[in-house]
Amino acid sequence: MRPLIAVLLALAAPAHAAEWFVSTLGSDTTGSGSAAAPFRTLGHVLDPGLGLLTAGDVVTVRGPAGNNTYDECEVRLRLPLTLRSPPGERAHLHCDHNILDTVTVQIDPDASGSTLSNLEISGGYYYALFLQTDWDSTGNPSGHGASNIVIEDCLIHDSGRDAIKITPKSNDVSIRRCEIRHSGRRYPPGTPLDDMNAEGIDNVNGSRMRVADSYIHDIATTGLYFKGGASDVVVERNRIERTGAAGILVGFDTSPEFFDTVANPQYYEAIRGVVRNNIVIDTGYSGIGLYAALDALVANNTLIRTATLGHAAIYFGVTLQDWDPIAGRPPSVNPRIRNNLVLQNGGDCAGIRWLDEIEPGGLYSLSGSPGSDYNRFHDSTGACNFFDTRPGSSLDNGGAFAAWQAEEGSDAHSVEAATAIAADGHLVAGSAAIDAGTVVAEVGDDIDRETRNAPFDIGADERDAGAVFRDGFESVLR
């Protein structure tokens, strides 16, 4: 007879995760899901009615070159799984964005803990990738969203609206080493920006999201934002290019029902957000914008040719929250803006907005100082323009850098001058940005993961002749 302790340990031991295989050469009729006899569709292996899967299982989707496309909509994870392609292959999950009311891949709240790895995901009438929630501020305030999700080494593109949509209480989402591009395919050319909702990453009240080492480009509206009360989000070491609206927004404008007013009674859009070591190039509006942001850090970013249509490279915007009388609409409070390199081609370098349409007293985008210093500004078309439209400001119609320093009591160690950089945003030998910054405790490396040494360089790059997006974009851009 086996000793009782051995029996108990055997009963308590977790079952080993099973691996299931899907291939374009497989069969849902005769396949068993093994490597030798794979299924044909994800819809089959994920079908809850068949009961094939157990939490923790791995679904490996074959994706050999030339035969890797799965035309499937509503690929839905209902329990924690790893969905991946094998090394050397990449399966392409595609849903035509003209098919009404679809997403390509959805992750349910009960699938929290899942990983998507090495996949191409495209299309979807709404979203290519959708993280669902069952949280509701009134009906189900104890609910949660799809959380502890890892999205890595994926190509996500050509969505009808947002490429990635993250809904309330979908917390602790990590997006790393991904390429995200060409959102908003459902909108005809020439559609006004105000009529589009097509971000690269749209996060509404998902806390502790981390977006790192990714390439986000050719986005119809904003590259990425986190809003609705999202807290402790980190956006680092990304390259964001060619966005119709903004590059990165810390907060934005959210309907009141998406806020958790127990945790966030003042309706801050973003709390303790960190944006560091990013390169943002060619945006229609702000390079980095702050909206109702509490205790934000924006440090060591490089902004090139941003705000060509409006706002400013670094911009404080107002949040209206649907003009709802119950909303808080707070200003940004206690920002820190350090070591940023701003190189413009006609767009304003920094700006603070005030809106007089809310009574009494108008609507402020910022309370107090912008908290900016050790930044470097330049406009290739002439002197940088800075504005602050708050009542009593001398910069209501814009002004020069010296006026900005005097009016805001900030940027004492910042400089307006030309700065030598490479076309990709890296510093070149002899650049005046080298060793011109200050140490920021929350910034330990640069966009290439090179260690920063005091005094820090200004911008996303800590000068090292041998580092070009090392360990980050190289795998994404291959």
Image (cartoon, grey):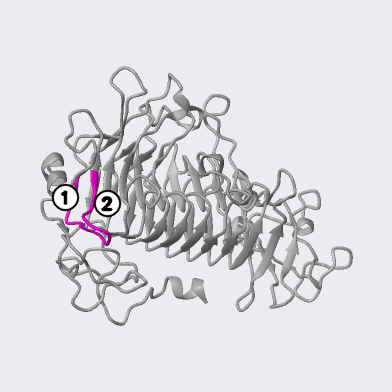
Pick whichever, 206 or 396, lies toward us. 396
Label 1 crowd bin: few (<14), some (14–19), many (20+), radius 10 Å: many
Q: In the rendered structure, find residue 401 and report the number of the disc placed on it.
A: 1
Residue type indicated by callout 1: Phe
Q: Position of residue 454 (x, y in %)?
A: 15, 67
Residue type indicated by callout 2: Cys
Highlighted magenta segment, given as a residue range: 371-386
Q: Is residue 295 visible?
A: no
Q: Residue at x 38, y 73 (%)?
A: 469
Label 2 crowd bin: few (<14), some (14–19), many (20+), radius 10 Å: many
Element at badge 2? loop
Q: Are marks 1 and 2 in contact (CB under 8 Å)?
A: yes
157 lies left or right of 409: right
**Residue 121, quarter of picture:** bottom right
The residue that mark 2 highlights is 349
Pick whichever, 238 or 58, lies toward us. 238
Q: Position of residue 100 (x, y in %)?
A: 74, 45
